[in-house]
Structure formats: structure tokens, C-alpha cells
Amino acid sequence: MAKYMIQFSYTQEGVRGLLTEGGTNRRKATEELVRSLGGRLEAYYYTFGEYDGVAIIDKMDNVEAAAAAMTAAASGAVKTMTTVLLEPDEIDRVARKTPTYRPPGASFQ
């Protein structure tokens, strides 16, 4: 199972709902969505800047993470960007791989 960072931005409609329900209730709704797909909401924060918030999701695979993002997007109240997070030991395993690759334009050998 992978871990994901979901950055989210509310639409105008979503901001109206957030102002009505409050941040705590939106966190609970997100937690319910994630739990319904077998995942765990590890962290949930509101932010300034390009995105209105970020959630860290654990115990989901790519299909479940996509289902969560698409469900939220289909509401029309939120837009998301999903990033897969890698643990340091996963990078250690990546570093031990020796793939074969020829860059574009390089000669064949």
C-alpha cells in the first residue's frame, strides 16, 4: 500500500460549504471518504497559497486513491492534486536498481 499527499482547492461553491460547515466537519467528511475505501487519514491541514489544504492518506493503492480523488472532484466543490509519497527505504531500493536506458537522440550501442 502506498501513501499519498492530496492537495486540494475549493471551488466557490466549496468555500461556501466550508464556511457553513467549518473545517472540522470537512476533515471528518474526508476521513469518512478515505475510511470507506480502506485507507487511513494520517494528517489534514488547511494552507495558504495555491492550495487550500493538504491531506496525507495511508493504506490505499492507486485505484483507491483515484476513487477518492474522483469522488471529491465529481462533487464540483473541490479540485485535487495527488502525489505518491515514497519512504526513505523505498528510495534505497530504487538506488539498488540498475535499469537499462538510452536517452532520446543517443546512439544505439
Image (tube, helix red, strand yellow):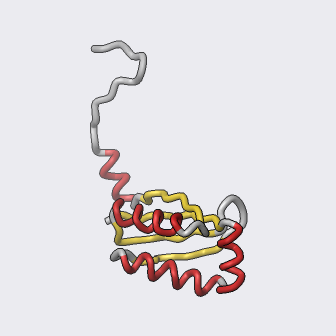
User: Which residue appears at 35% of the width and 68% of the height?
Assistant: 60
| Closer to us: 76 or 32 | 76
At x 54% / y 69%, what residue is drawn?
A: 75
Residue drawn at (72%, 66%), measured in percent from left and top? Answer: 48
Residue drawn at x 65%, y 67% as measured from the top left: 10
Query: Which quarter of the rendered picture does the C terminus lie within?
Result: top left
Q: Is residue 104 left or right of residue 96?
A: right
Q: Is residue 109 left or right of residue 17?
A: left
Q: In this figure, what is the number of numbered marks? A: 0
Where is residue 44 drawn, in percent x and y?
55, 76
Coordinates of residue 37 in the picture (x, y in percent): 36, 74
Q: Quarter of the image containing the N terminus?
A: bottom left
Q: Is residue 89 left or right of residue 48?
A: left
In this rendering, the answer to whether 32 lies above or below 85 is below
- Residue 59 sits in which quadrant? bottom left
Residue 64 picture quarter: bottom left
Identify which residue, 10 or 84, lies in the foreground.
10
Q: Residue 108 or 30: which is nearer the viewer?
A: 30
Tell me residue 67's x, y (percent).
40, 65
Q: Position of residue 92 (x, y in %)?
A: 34, 52
